[in-house]
Amino acid sequence: MTSSTAADYIEDVSPGSGALPPRARYTTSDAKSLSLNGSWRLRVSATADAEDDSFAEEGYDAGDWAEVAVPGHWVLQGHGSPIYTNHLYPFPVDPPHVPTENPTGDHLRVFDLPSEWPSDGGAVLRFDGVESCARVWLNGTDIGEFKGSRLPHEFAVGHLLKPSGNVLAVRVHQWSAGSYLEDQDQWWLPGIFRDVTLLHRPPGSALDFFVHASYDHLGGAGTLRVDSDVDGRITVPALDIDVATGESVTVAVRPWTAETPYLYDGLLTTEGERVPLRIGFRTVELSDGLIKVNGKAVLFKGVNRHEWHPEKGRALDRETMREDVLLMKRHNINAVRTSHYPPHPDFLDLCDEYGLWVIDECDLETHGFTEQAWRDNPVDDDRWTPALLDRAARMVERDKNHPSIVVWSLGNEAGTGRGLTAMAEWIHARDRSRLVHYEGDINCRDTDVYSRMYADHTEVERIGQELDGGTHKRRGLPFILCEYGHAMGNGPGGLADYQRLFESYERLQGGFIWEWIDHGIKDERYGFAYGGDFGEELHDGNFVCDGLLFPDRVPSPGLIEYKKVVEPVSIDGSDGSVRVTNKHDFADLSAFAFQWSYQVDGETVESGPLTVPPLAPGESAEVKLPAPPVESDGAESQWTVRALLAADTAWAPAGHVVGWGHIPVTARPLPYVSATAGPVLGERRITLGPASFDARTGELKSLGVVDVTGLRLDVWRATTDNDDGASWQTDVRHGPLWRKLGLHRMRHRLDGVELSEDALTVRTRVAPAAWEIGLATVYRWTSDGSRLRLTVSVAPEGDWTVPLPRLGIRFGLDASADRVKWFGGGPGEGYPDTKSASLPARWESTVDGLQTPYVRPQENGARADVRWAELGGLRIDGDPEFWFTARRWTTEQLDAAAHRTDLTPADTVWVNLDHGQHGIGSQSCGPGPLPQYFLDAEPAEFSFVFSEAAFSETPETS
Ligand code: IPT
């Protein structure tokens, strides 16, 4: 039986009905407006048609309904649950049909017009974002329905308004035909999640307008023309401009760039309205196969930004958006891809104001169709094309007046097809002043930029060298990585290696890290929840936590690393001078002040200013350092030179560090212990200098007053998301292989405890059950009576086909070992391919402060290149430098934990001193570590000198 119901619009592939044509968005004007944000009444039903539409009638009593905050998602306010899937549709794929179980939120709001609301003119009701499909009634009249969750929809409602008691009823369905177009990798979160506003439209008010503001870099002139549906005048006082709409004017201007975001205040005046404009003059073009702005090729140091707040989901307030922009600017990021939908429009105002290049991406992804080889993909089905064009138009029309937007993106992971081509054609025709991007178009049929995601270094280099082939058109296009450096958990690794490529080949115009922020949901049970924590039948776990920020916007080490890798000024040097290079595309160095400091044994002994010429973009200069302020007296010494903001900027105060270099001067003397004391065998103990060992096992028990437990070789680390890799990765994934081989359950066989005149030697074989591989491990202890030296020799046996996770020793100290001091890399963690930002100096922390709280716990917190460390009354000097980790739980506990709340401190501080760590890479969705960061299983020897910290003297030197 087929019958049509009032809810047919839900499964209709059309974009909707009743809405006004899309137009430019502007935040303010002198026309009145009324925000309808706030507390609304809410009733959630399990199906789309469980309730009739009588709630939309005037006089309906919703007194017993719940309340919901608008903007907001009802599933984050106690009604139902969020669902996380990466690309699988959480419903059967049968487009355009959706499940009968279709959570539906009836929203109700009664409002009065303010007394000063004019009686003339009309009014428009604007929804900035509703997921995924809404039907709207005002005062009992059905005014239309729409889809396109992250796009604006406006309705003419003037004729329906009354001075008081207006009833606005909105029925929101979680699932609709539109859901098939919104399969982005994120939480499914229904609701009215962006602003609802009533706008007065005075007679003669502005309608749509298009600000064309180009810049001629040769002559330094800007040309302004504002095309407007309603005639009026354009004034820009600072430029003495006063012209009619539609008329061009050319004057000398300061151009807009992301580095120099110069905006002119202007005004569009129509008969009935005055609309403030913020005008940025700039020209984007494809020329010589490069993306150029104002005549210069730009290098994107970008991030992919989803909108996220750990409690509010995608309902962000302006302060949160500003925080994102400030954090980006402070971390040297210059570009954002609005993955994968147009953001709240305020975000784009902020990008104009603070200066960020923007790729504005359309709200379109049909990724789940990949599971059926893209059969029935809506983007290649003409019935859906009107919906796609509607989405393209709603994005372009809303956002076209933002100078920050340099590229339009058709969407993400939607295969290819006629609908996408139609979108590209429409956008190209509507806006010739920007380029079009879409990653899935491998031959660049519809696009102006060759774009890829997660390509490895080798392939990116080939593309840079133009050896990648491809269609004739593609060969002539610039290249960007629209996603790379998958920031899931510990990592991403290899960023510096990508950056070197970007800086070496002109065709490579940079990339965008995946992604800006972890989408963890604040949750009492877990700290932050991720996929599966709400009982979803299908989910993708913590793949939703893959950002450079933790969900609460605390920067993760990945962001600190990225900041260093993309610094706008580089400083390196040797022999008393530094080479300073301006890596900006537009700005000189006049905004920066430079400062040197000189460290001996990691401690700063003096600092002072350094005069650096205001180099033009791309220029370098050799700058002489002063004479070293002190004799190093045999200790290690180094220069650290920093570039700081010379004055306050809109995004950071004076003194903010933008870049630095570390220049070694004299090398560290390696610690040396003369083996003058010999081991003495007692009844149950062997003593050697200050240390005591178990006579039977040779295990270290104490050093002076410090008790030590469980000291032994350790090769295991709680695998990172990048070690584990994504299940669909075709390359070798080390995490699963390590586990299969049992590197997490190594057994230690004691082969001998030997006492000689000057050493205690303990021979062991460390190996997992079931396999023939093993590590012959010898611990050799010597002492000069006060200090103790351990030399560990490791010889792999059998056929080791995998690298090791780590190689070093671990031991336990009493829980009172809380404070750590070290000379080595810091302040944050670093691994072989993530330690650009690790600055060798003296650092201090609590043990808890050493932990990086990844949302899904995993290996973290290693400090790189540590010369010495002190904790719990012990001092440890490394020969050579080592990786230092300390935590109040074991690696096994860390490995087993699924959420932060699973980690609770016990009575031991576990310390790892590693000779080697395996690289991190980006295999949770990209390439693994580069071969040079592998920790291959090979013969190794490394030493540590232990002494009691309180009595420690500078070790003798060899
Ligand atoms: C890529 C997606 O574009 C992005 O939305 C996100 O899912 C990311 O992966 C992983 O976090 S698609 C992937 C098949 C490369």
Image: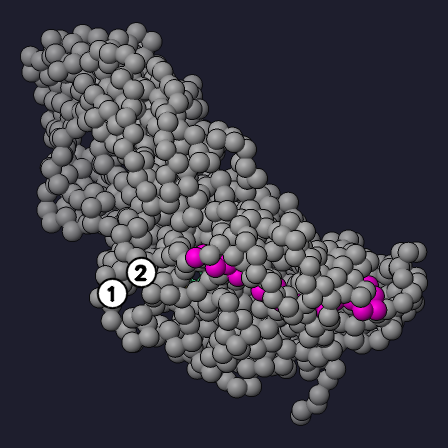
The answer to whether residue 92 is seen in the rendering is no
The residue shown at (67%, 91%) is 2
690 or 202, which is in the foreground?
202
Q: Are marks 1 and 2 in contact (CB under 8 Å)?
A: yes
Q: Amino acid at mark 1?
A: Glu
Circle 2 SS class? loop
Crowding at label 1, few (<14), some or many (≥20) Cα neighbours within 10 Å? some
**What residue did someone put label 2 on?**
507
Left or right side of 52 for 786: left
Question: Which percent across, then down, holds residue 432?
Answer: 50, 71
The amino acid type of the residue labelled 2 equals: Arg
Q: Quadrant of residue 22?
A: bottom right
Q: Measuring 60% from the left and 66% from the top, which residue is drawn there?
A: 248
- Work out which residue is located at the far bottom of the displayed protein and give it: 1
Mark 2 within 8 Å of ligand 1, using the beta carbon: no
Q: Give left or right: position of 459 versus 672.
A: right
Looking at the image, tell me whether mark 1 or mark 2 is earlier in sequence order. 1
Q: Give the extent of the magenta segment.
A: 198-218
| Ligand 1 in which quarter | bottom left
Residue on which disc 1 sits: 466
For image coordinates 64% across by 66% down, the residue present is 226
Q: Position of residue 104 (x, y in %)?
A: 70, 68
Name which residue lies at 57% across and 61% down.
250
Instruction: Report the quarter where the N terminus lies.
Output: bottom right
Q: Nearer the viewer, residue 721 or 289?
A: 289
Q: Is residue 512 above or below residue 423?
A: above
